């Protein structure tokens, strides 16, 4: 008997993808995709803040004018390169392009330094928990009633897009002159600082009022209540089992991981991420940190 989780997936160059969204031909086309100088790629491992950055950047380019983007679905604000390439090609420049692909599967021109990349990452325990819920509401993925099993599948890369560890390492170890790394935690704790950093990176100058509008209209509550950003109109999800946008919080992992699971994950993290010097926030500063990983 096959693994019900991996039976929902097919492999392309060693990475698992969902049959219902991706196909070999579309993934093969990515290599030769023509990247423009003003293209901005939003790259993420799933459930790391992709939707938030899509909304946020669309508002930055609209200079805070929500009326320009409110009624546009996230799929159209920043279409997915590996699943919607024809839509990407037709998108008005400057293009916002989303991708879950690891660095080595990105277009050759991007790997060679063309365009700009905003890479969003999130502490992997919160990513794992959010991914666990994603699997439970996605109709064509195996529901995960056993959290322990999913922890092991995540560690063993038997989930959509494969290894979080390899994905993140790939974006940090490969050189690209125009990559900005942003964490979900920094966006949560100090969106002002992230907004300033992103605008400088993109060469955008916004007024104080425009910046406030960007922050307000990309807040979790606003996104959660907008059907164009909360995915409530997407048929691939079973919303009787949950919502696409759940809590949007830092440290949710502590409500799911047992001490043993946390320690097991910490051991894997230390082994797989050694040398990168990543410094994640594992909990909000107002609360006492409980993660045993020492990040150096």
Image (cartoon, grey):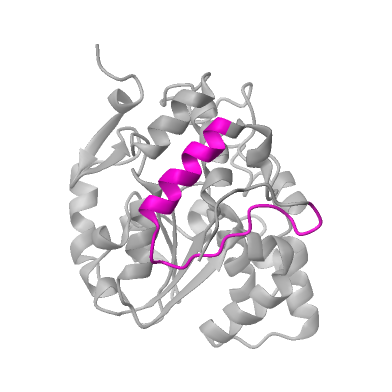
Q: Residue 17: name its quadrant.
A: top left
Residue 55: x percent and y percent? Answer: 61, 60
For image coordinates 42% across by 26% down, the residue present is 141
Q: Is residue 74 above or below residue 175?
A: above
For image coordinates 56% across by 25% down, the residue present is 238
Magenta stretch contains residue 28: no
Residue 22: x percent and y percent? Answer: 30, 41
Q: Residue 40: name its quadrant.
A: bottom left
**Of residues 97 and 11, the one drawn nearer to the viewer in this rendering:** 11
Residue 45: x percent and y percent? Answer: 44, 52
State whether residue 91 appears in this view.
yes
Q: Residue 215: name its quadrant.
A: bottom right
Magenta stretch contains residue 271: yes
Q: Is residue 132 left or right of residue 194?
A: left
Quadrant in which the N terminus is drawn: top left
**Of residues 64 and 9, the one drawn nearer to the viewer in this rendering:** 9
Q: How many marks?
A: 0
Q: Is residue 258 above or below residue 70?
A: above
* Magenta region, residue range: 260-287
**Of residues 281 and 164, the one drawn nearer to the viewer in this rendering:** 281
Q: Is residue 24 above or below residue 167?
A: above
**Of residues 22 and 271, the one drawn nearer to the viewer in this rendering:** 271
Q: Is residue 12 above or below residue 136?
A: below
Give the farthest residue toward the top.
Answer: 1
State whether residue 69 appears in this view.
no
For image coordinates 46% across by 68% down, the residue present is 277
Q: Is residue 174 left or right of residue 198?
A: left
For image coordinates 57% across by 62% down, the residue present is 53
């Amino acid at each position: 008997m096959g693994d019900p989780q991996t039976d929902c997936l097919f492999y392309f160059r060693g990475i698992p993808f969902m049959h219902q969204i991706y196909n070999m031909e579309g993934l093969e086309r990515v290599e030769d995709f023509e990247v423009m100088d003003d293209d901005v790629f939003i790259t993420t491992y799933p459930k790391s803040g992709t939707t938030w950055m899509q909304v946020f950047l669309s508002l930055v380019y609209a200079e805070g004018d929500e009326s320009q983007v409110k009624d546009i679905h996230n799929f159209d604000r920043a279409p997915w390169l590996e699943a919607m390439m024809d839509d990407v090609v037709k998108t008005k420049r400057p293009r916002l392009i989303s991708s879950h692909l690891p660095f080595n599967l990105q277009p050759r021109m991007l790997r060679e330094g063309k365009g700009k990349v905003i890479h969003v990452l999130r502490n992997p325990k919160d990513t794992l928990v959010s991914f666990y819920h994603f699997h439970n509401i996605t109709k064509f993925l195996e529901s995960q009633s056993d959290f322990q099993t999913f922890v092991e599948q995540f560690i063993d890369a038997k989930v959509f897009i494969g290894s979080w560890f390899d994905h993140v390492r790939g974006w940090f170890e490969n050189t690209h002159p125009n990559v900005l790394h942003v964490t979900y935690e920094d966006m949560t704790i100090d969106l002002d600082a992230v907004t300033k950093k992103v605008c400088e990176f993109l060469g955008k100058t916004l007024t104080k009022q425009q910046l406030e509008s960007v922050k307000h209209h990309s807040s979790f509550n606003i996104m959660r209540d907008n059907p164009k950003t909360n995915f409530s109109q997407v048929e691939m999800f079973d919303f009787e089992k949950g919502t696409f946008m759940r809590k949007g919080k830092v440290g949710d992992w502590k409500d799911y991981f047992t001490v043993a699971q946390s320690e097991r994950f910490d051991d894997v993290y230390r082994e797989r991420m050694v040398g990168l010097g990543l410094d994640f926030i594992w909990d909000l500063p107002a609360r006492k940190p409980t993660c045993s990983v020492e990040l150096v």
